[in-house]
Image (cartoon, helix red, strand yellow):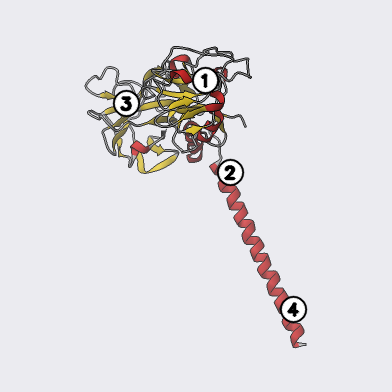
Amino acid sequence: MVRAICTIVYVALQLVNGMKDDMAESSLIHFRSRDENLAHEAAPPAWYESRSPDGKCTWDDKIPGAPLGKEPHTIVMSLKFETSGYSKRQWIFNLGQDTTGAEHWLWNNGNNVQFGTWNGHQVATISDITKARTLATVYQNGNLKVYMDGVLVPGASKSVPGMDITSDALAVGSNAGYPSEDPFKGCIHAVDVYRVALSDHQIFAAARALMSEACADGTDDVIFSAGKVVGCDGDFAGGIQKGQSLCAAGWKVCKSGDEVSSNGVDAAKCKSCDTMASSTFYATSQSGPGNNICNPADETGKNDLWGCGCSGPVASTCGVLAYRFGSGNNYKWKSWSASDGLDEVGTTVKASGHGGVMCCKQAR
């Protein structure tokens, strides 16, 4: 009898503990699902996408429609800082008129910044700002918040009662009209403007979309088209397909000038030395049937490789692709070579320095 009662009690306790475990796991799954849904909350389409019209790293633009005034808005920017050669305060961004009430972002060196309203209240410090790949601000109800790489910067929330944007002007890294100060010395790749205040999770998604993370080493070296085409530095041997190791998951070596063009890269951007070091080459797998022959329709070609670069050895072009590599012209790109001059596709070696491959985002 005692043994039977003990057995019943033991079984009951096991059932209760099992129910607790199931409930705990159920709760864990629920919170996991909730967090994952929030983390993957998509940002709405940008109201306006500002991109460089000529491949330069800074530019002036105008936003469409009526000025923002005191309306809620969000700015998301993809950029890369240059920390050498600093001499004067640099302009990162200005939205609106060149006077009181505009939203502007200034970098004063180090962690010292001025993010806020012209002649008004401003965020003064952003730690490690020069490591940022994206910066963003959200304005709503007289308050401005600053985000770096999709995450709210601690302490970077400021009351800005004077924000009142009365102009459609957009200065992206440009210091036009203020020669006593410097334009942005790094490179701005893209700016997205939203006529709403995005949530924290939407900011994360919007920033990730511009950051792209195209390169396997986590550093997008040259952004030809934000979120779509990126130049990844690195070395490889045994042909252009070995260069795939430089691209992150979800990205592939761009196959042709047509693919590069369809993703928003024009000839000016392809050979802009504003974004690339001199004598730098990023290859696609575009080749041809013979020396210096561009034939996108011939998928059996193995001769030469076309791509984008700065100060290439020859002025050959293949659609928007500005330069080519062949085994005979490695006197200029000294880190590139090929053991078979008729098969650069299969035998190219990239040995050192800047340059590598162009990686294109793959459709899901």
Disc 3 from disc 1: Cα separation: 42 Å
Left or right, 104 with reference to 17: left
Where residue 185 sits: x, y (%)?
31, 26
Mark 2 is on which residue type?
Answer: Asn
Where residue 213 sits: x, y (%)?
49, 35
Badge 4: how crowded within 10 Å, few (<14), some, or many (20+)?
Answer: few
Residue positioned 74% across, 78% down in the render: 8
Residue under numbered circle 4: 8
Upstream in sequence: badge 3 or badge 1? 3
Upstream in sequence: badge 2 or badge 1? 2
The numbered mark at residue 116 is none
Q: Indicate the secondary structure of the residue bearing disc 2.
A: helix
User: Which of 278/19 is in front?
Assistant: 278
Upstream in sequence: badge 4 or badge 3? 4
Badge 1: how crowded within 10 Å, few (<14), some, or many (20+)?
Answer: some
Q: Residue furthest bottom?
A: 1
Mark 3 is on which residue type?
Answer: Phe
Nearer to us of marks 4 and 1 is 1
Badge 2: how crowded within 10 Å, few (<14), some, or many (20+)?
Answer: few
In the rendered view, tell whether residue 252 sits above or below residue 8.
Answer: above
Where residue 134 sits: x, y (%)?
42, 34
Residue under numbered circle 3: 184
Quadrant of residue 87 within the rendered picture: top left
Upstream in sequence: badge 4 or badge 1? 4
Disc 4 from disc 2: Cα separation: 43 Å
Disc 4 from disc 1: Cα separation: 83 Å
Residue under numbered circle 2: 37
The numbered mark at residue 341 is 1
Disc 2 from disc 1: Cα separation: 52 Å
Disc 4 from disc 3: Cα separation: 76 Å
Mark 4 is on which residue type?
Answer: Ile
